Amino acid sequence: MIVDTGRRAIAEFLRQYFTQMDLGDGTDITNPAQIALDNPIITTKQTITPVLHADTGYTLEFTADFTGSTLQGSTLSEIGIFGTSSIAVGATGHEEDWDSNNEIKNKLLVREVIDALGPFSSTDIVTVSVVIEVI
């Protein structure tokens, strides 16, 4: 069991180091080894500020607004939250074992496949929220 202090620490780590959202039109099942969306539809990931909910201390909300001009003509069916730090996880701690593939930068934290939305017009605004609870 991860105790409340540990859950909050994990949530705080996620809040600090996973601060980008990307959208795509992929529809297949997510593979646990997947590090990117199947088919991104925007050219630059959007920087977000995840909110750590004070009521629990271990529920995070990742929210971003996307303009229709960014999504124009696209159909949205996958959402991804990405790392923005060059810190490495999974390395042994020995310098000779360090590998840039262990960096979390531009790697998926979570990918959610949804029922397709769109296509969007240039005047649309799409708000996307992903809620994660560390349990």
Image (cartoon, rainbow, N blue to C red):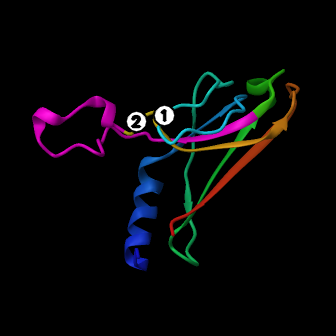
Name the quadrant containing residue 20: top right
Residue drawn at point x = 50 percent, y = 42 percent? 32
Name the quadrant containing residue 42: top right
| Amino acid found under the numbered disc labelled 1 | Ile
Asked if the magenta segment contains residue 101, the reply would be yes
Q: CA distance from mark 2 to mark 1?
A: 10 Å
| Amino acid found under the numbered disc labelled 2 | Lys
Residue drawn at point x = 51 percent, y = 70 percent? 135
Would you name the residue on which mark 2 appears?
105
Range shown magenta: 77-103
Residue drawn at point x = 16 percent, y = 35 percent? 97
Query: In the image, which is nearer the foreground, mark 2 or mark 1?
Result: 1
Would you name the residue on which mark 1 appears?
35
Q: Counting residues from the N terminus, which is met first, the one under dot 2 or under dot 1?
A: 1
Residues packed near mark 1 inside 10 Å, few (<14), some (14 to 19) or many (20 plus): some
Instruction: Name the side, left or right, on which 59 lies relative to 130.
Output: left
